[in-house]
């Protein structure tokens, strides 16, 4: 049995999405002015950052944009593929500190490991759900394009207002992003 069909995800799409998120995130850190780039390094290195709304929108807009792309590419399971892309890319961006905390975190913040894990868990969740939101927008858009004029477009409006597939991921993504930024500010 083909592994792709069993999991209903496409590893090529996932690799593409993860690579795009990582590349955009890294490019943003170099291309944007310092005050327009949000990161959690203030927490690690005790250098509190001035939080800019523009920087936060850029940071958490990246998974939405990539989720939109995944929605166009992954026709079979855009939600599942986007969720994996969001989680995996955020995990890859943070894994060095997760794995080598004792080596990478300064001694003055060693006792903050649990707070760091909570903040990054929220970060992983926000990237996962925001990618899902992007793919959901694409799915709804593609359904709208394929709808006949004779077909009732109320179904599409119902899809937009669907709690489980649209509203819940948006709320979870936005709330986890807000909590991760807020906790980072508290602990830095």
Image: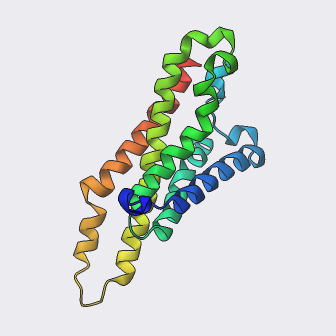
Nearer-the-camera pick, 51 or 13: 13
User: At 35% from the left edge and 77% from the top edge, which residue is drawn?
Assistant: 144
Residue 175, image quadrant: top left
Residue at 35% over, 45% down? 171
Please say if 56 is above or below 153. above
Q: Position of residue 80 (x, y in %)?
A: 39, 56
Q: Quadrant of residue 176?
A: top left
Q: Residue at x 47, y 62 (%)?
A: 10
Task: Pick whichever, 62 or 23, lies toward us.
Answer: 23
In x, y percent, where is residue 40? 61, 30
Q: How is the image coloured?
A: rainbow
**Please, is residue 108 above or below residue 45 in the view?**
above
Q: Nearer the viewer, residue 52 or 124?
A: 124
Q: Is residue 40 above or below residue 144?
A: above
Q: Is residue 38 left or right of residue 8?
A: right
Q: Percent x, y for residue 1?
A: 38, 62
Q: Quadrant of residue 44?
A: top right
As drawn, the residue found furthest toward the bottom would be 150
Looking at the image, residue 54 sits to the left or right of residue 3; the answer is right
């Amino acid at each position: 049995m083909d592994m792709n069909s069993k999991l209903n995800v496409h590893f090529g799409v996932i690799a593409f999405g993860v690579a795009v998120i990582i590349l955009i995130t890294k490019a943003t850190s170099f291309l944007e002015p310092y005050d327009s780039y949000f990161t959690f390094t203030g927490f690690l290195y005790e250098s509190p950052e001035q939080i800019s709304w523009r920087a936060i929108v850029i940071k958490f807009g990246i998974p939405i944009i990539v989720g939109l792309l995944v929605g166009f590419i992954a026709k079979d399971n855009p939600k599942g593929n986007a969720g994996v892309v969001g989680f995996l890319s955020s995990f890859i961006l943070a894994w060095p500190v997760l794995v080598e905390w004792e080596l990478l975190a300064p001694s003055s913040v060693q006792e903050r490991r649990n707070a760091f894990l909570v903040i990054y868990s929220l970060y992983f969740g926000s990237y996962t759900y925001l990618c899902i939101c992007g793919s959901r927008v694409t799915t709804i858009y593609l359904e709208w394009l394929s709808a006949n004029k004779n077909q009732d477009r109320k179904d599409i409006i119902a899809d937009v207002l669907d709690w489980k597939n649209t509203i819940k991921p948006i709320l979870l993504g936005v709330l986890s992003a807000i909590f991760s930024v807020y906790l980072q500010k508290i602990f830095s």
